[in-house]
Image (cartoon, rainbow, N blue to C red):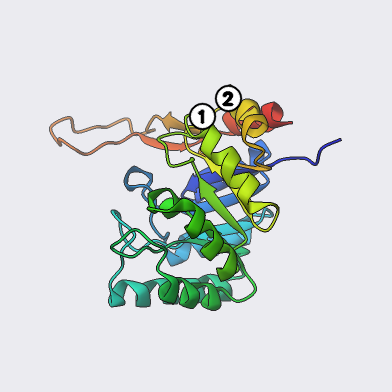
Amino acid sequence: MSARRLLEIACDGLGSALAAQQGGADRVELFADLASGGLTPSHGTIAVARERLQLPLFVLVRPRAGDFLYQDWEAAVMLQDIRHCRELGCDGVVLGALTAEGDVDLPLCRELVAAAGDMHVTFHRAFDAVRDPRTALEQIVQLGCTRVLSSGARASAAEGMATLAGTVQQAAGRIGIMAGAGITPDNIAGIALGTGCSELHASAKLRRQSRMRHRNLALAGLEVDHLQTDVAQVAALRTALG
């Protein structure tokens, strides 16, 4: 019998993290600002999440939206955020940095991984933006990262299944390959089977309606509803994954 596959839920805020736990997730990736692809969450969010979650807690370390080419001051922010996560007792961090040529920024990534200490390190989907994935994977292995999050360099893991399968073969058990992007209860089992990935990453988000009874409709751009991880969707993902 094959080992149980792990389900990580991408959580935009504490409400999503608590829903992921209730729905049966195995691990939480915590971040802020889902609309921008995820940014480092606040001190308060991380601290309260650590207090209230019994699941392994990984925190995204990303100082801004956009590319993964960082200036010195951005690197300094990332290093401080990683140290902060260690102090709060987080289990892991999620990070990545590239050069202007699309290679892994080895000097910076070495610093970031070193700052993580005994925390696990996931190299995030910056991997999908590199120019030479095979070389990049070998470098990430040498950095000592625990896993790579990837969609196979496509818009969704379903589209990138063949590439993901090749990455799993190249990794050969030296590093975990976690499939993510566009994963739903309907496709998660097929993606796991087709790629060989033992870890799957999904957001399970659903639009939650505001409880506000008073709304000023003249305030254009002020959205009162919000996206949040849904307990039922997490449970459905866990059931489908087996």
* Helix, strand or loop under label 1: loop
Asked whether residue 217 appears in the rendered view, the answer is yes
Q: Is residue 104 above or below residue 234?
A: below
Left or right for 179, reference 4: left
Q: Residue at x 48, y 59 (%)?
A: 136
Hey, what amino acid is under mark 2? Answer: Asn
**Position of residue 158 measured from the top left corner of the image (x, y, whole percent):** 51, 29
Give the Cα distance between marks 1 and 2: 8 Å
Q: Residue at x 47, y 37 (%)?
A: 181
In-front residue for pair 183/165: 165
**Position of residue 9 measured from the top left corner of the image (x, y, whole percent):** 57, 43
Residue 158 tag number = 1
In-front residue for pair 232/144: 144
Asked whether residue 19 appears in the rendered view, the answer is no
Residue 185 tag number = none
**Position of residue 162 measured from the top left corner of the image (x, y, whole percent):** 54, 33
Q: Residue at x 61, y 50 (%)?
A: 170
Q: Residue at x 53, y 57 (%)?
A: 137
Q: How would you rate the neighbour count of disc 2 (Cα within 10 Å): few for under 14, some for 14-19, many for 20 or more?
A: some
**Badge 2 is on which residue?**
187
Left or right for 6, reference 158: right
Residue at the outermost right position: 1
N-terminal label among 1 and 2: 1
Hey, what amino acid is under mark 1? Answer: Ala
Q: Are marks 1 and 2 in contact (CB under 8 Å)?
A: yes
